[in-house]
Amino acid sequence: MTYAGVQMFMEKLNQLINCNEIPSINSPAIIRERPQFQLLYDELASMIQTLFNHQHQDLEKVNDLKKRFTDAAEEAQYILDLFLSDVHRNTEQFSYLDDGRRSYKYVVNLFISCFLICVKGHLPTSGYFNPTLDLDSVMRSFNLVKVELASMNIHNTKMDSSRRTPNLVNLRHLWSSRRNALLLPFIDKPMMSLQTISNVELGDWIHYFQKCFPYIQELKCTTNSEKVYGYDFKSLPCLEKLNLIGIFRRKNHITFPTTLKTLTLKGCRLPWSDMSIIQSLPNLQVLKLKIRAFEGSCWKTDEQVFQQLKFLRLEKLNIKHWEAYSTSFPCLKQLEIYYCQNLEETPLEIGDIPTLELIKIEDCRHSLGESVRRIQEEQHDFGNYDLKIDVTTSFLYKKFQKSINVAANFGLKTC
């Protein structure tokens, strides 16, 4: 892809970001992925500004980074085109439901849908009826280019840190956007007052981070290194809130401090056996597990007890089975399960948690929603009317349910 090609790709992204103004592409699936469009657009703009509009000393190295950047941009365009193709296919398929046409093509589409259910044994996953955009590999490529460019700038630029650090001695909160990632090697003195850091890339210099910010309380960070084999956050004795986005190609060992109260994990690819590390945190109250936080189809809590956990969210995990007991979450108040398309049901024992107030389910399998309703009915039988449930589905999922009903009118069995 050429520089002009990247510019054209950005124009396409800009249209998708502003899809509300263009009815022809105003699809629920596209609207849902708008934050990723915006993130990709910002990343491309930032890289263009850094690579193409600045002067660099090592032209050979920069040209290599430009080539890797444009290759990653071309990969992003390919992934985006596949996503849009899936969206268009699904929209075209379900459009027959709106005008009531019972054409031959419509019947064939319904038959194919029902056949997929029979073969798979369950409703089609989000990849077929609810397309999702996965740009992790592209973002990883961008991050590696950014890290090498930053490393090159460090070697080619003389920094007088003695003139920079005194101005930051009393700083308490530090935010860094993806366009201007915080480069930790520039900081050579401990910042004793700093409490919050948001959007920092740890890279290979994790040990600098632990040295420079010993009293950090809140941290949102991305790990993009292939050289580091573990991340020891346990050495941050005051850390209470951690949002960790991992870009790992292999499993890594991670430790956490006992002071942690809120933990969000994404892309860390941990085995479910490592949940025992999180379970042992005595002060943890909020736990959010997002896409690829853990890998594996089954989570068994066994005898694990989350002593103080009040809020649990499972989001876009590939988990199929979840075995848990009421004793595993003695203080849980709210459970949220979003876009876990393979999870079949919620453990019935969850309903026996005396503190549980709300269960929210969004865009999950029908059987999962039914299991939550059974939990509520069972609690009503015991006189507990305090437990609330909220089960919602997306536009495309509702369209699919409608197609199943129409299929029944044609005499097609859905297994």
Image: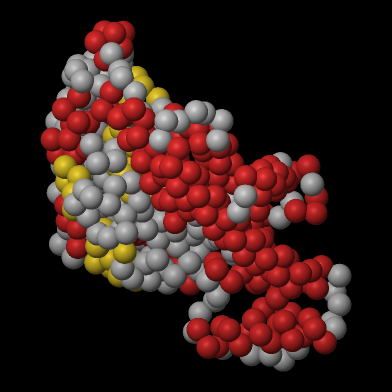
Colouring scheme applied when the structure was drawn: secondary structure
Q: Report the front residue among 212 and 149.
A: 149
In this picture, residue 75 sits left or right of residue 18: left
In this picture, residue 106 sits left or right of residue 211: right
Q: Report the front residue among 76 and 259.
A: 76
Q: x and y percent of residue 162 in the render?
A: 24, 10
Q: Is residue 377 above or below residue 15?
A: below
Asked whether residue 345 is in view, the answer is no
Residue appearing at x 66%, y 85% in the figure: 112
Q: x and y percent of residue 178 in the render?
A: 45, 34
Residue appearing at x 56%, y 30% in the figure: 53
Q: x and y percent of residue 282 in the render?
A: 15, 42
Q: Is residue 353 above or below residue 45?
A: below
Image quadrant of residue 156? top left
Image quadrant of residue 311? top left
Asked whether residue 101 is in view, the answer is yes
